[in-house]
Amino acid sequence: MMVPSVVPYLLAGPALARPVGTRLLPPCDLPAGPSLQSASGCRVAGGGARRPQHISFAAGGGAAGDAFVVEGATNVKFSRELTVPGHKEPLVILGTGYRDKFFVKVYAAAFYVDISIGLDTEQWRKKVGLESFDASSGFDSIFKAPVVKSLNITLVRDVDGNTFVKALDGVIARRIQKRTDEEESSLSAFRNSFLGRNLKKGTTIYLTWLEPSRMLVSVSTDQGPSQVDAEVKSATVNYALYDGFFGTSPVSPTLRSSTAQLLEAILTK
């Protein structure tokens, strides 16, 4: 399957310099499909033509549409590139989606991976251990591989910390039936970063998985994770959290679908 080099275009943005040889594609030079277009920041115009989704910058200006991707159902915008604590290279966005509960949208979400996927796809594929991409096994391979990943959750309504923790506890409980002392300690650290907080609309939670037994939790009300609020030191807990979003019963099917289609396009091109 021949597709254009998608990720170098996803790296487009005036804020960061790009390595020599990175090819930027014209806006929306992507394989057809609504999830791919959504993940890349494109929308389908009348008659099936594709055009870039333009997003005005805040104060300071810049080329409209270069720096952000909009999650269509919630209109939450995510940076195409993200710098996270504990990792010097930026991450690149691969997919967006949303979570609803009883038909009410609760948050938008975005998935990021190490920027190297766009610089040397073949090497990245070998690092992850993928010869071909299948959503069921593909995410599992990516989670177990030594590549940095970040799951970003932006609230679209006010949520108290206790409710947020209870929701994620439910995700983990379905995947870890009997918890060890290490797992319980890690979960306690995770819970304590949210308990007692009033998480306002617009708050973003960053779950950055640096290595199997090390996930950094950051809570921010601005554009990026400026500090680490907790560190989860259990590989099984970290895996359970991500599996809740990308496993066979994801809490956000739109995020999983969007990410899977773009990954497939990149890794099988």
Image (cartoon, helix red, strand yellow):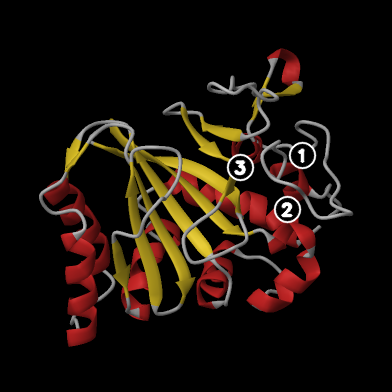
The C terminus - image quarter: bottom right
Q: Is there a contact, CB below 8 Å, between mark 2 and mark 1?
A: yes
SS of the residue under disc 1:
loop
Mark number displayed over residue 30: 1
In this picture, residue 81 sits left or right of residue 221: right
Tell me the residue at 45%/59% (across/down).
Answer: 246
In the image, farthest residue toward the front:
60
**Amino acid beneath label 2:** Ala
Q: Earlier in the sequence, mark 2 or mark 1?
A: 1
Spatial distance from mark 3 to mark 1, Cα to Cα?
A: 16 Å
Residue type at tag 3? Arg
Tell me the tag on residue 174: none
Tag 1: amino acid: Leu
Pick the residue in front: 178 or 48: 178
Q: CA distance from mark 2 to mark 1?
A: 9 Å
* Quadrant assignment for the N terminus: bottom right
Q: Secondary structure at mark 3?
A: loop
Q: Residue furthest top?
A: 46
Q: Of discs 2 and 3, which sits in the foreground?
A: 3
Could you classify mark 2 by the number of other residues whose Cα lies within 10 Å: few (under 14), some (14-19), or many (20 or more)? Answer: many
Residue on which the image places disc 3: 80
Measured as percent of width and height from the top left, residue 197 is found at 15, 46
Compared to 40, does 205 lie above or below? below
Residue that appears at 46% across and 61% down? 85
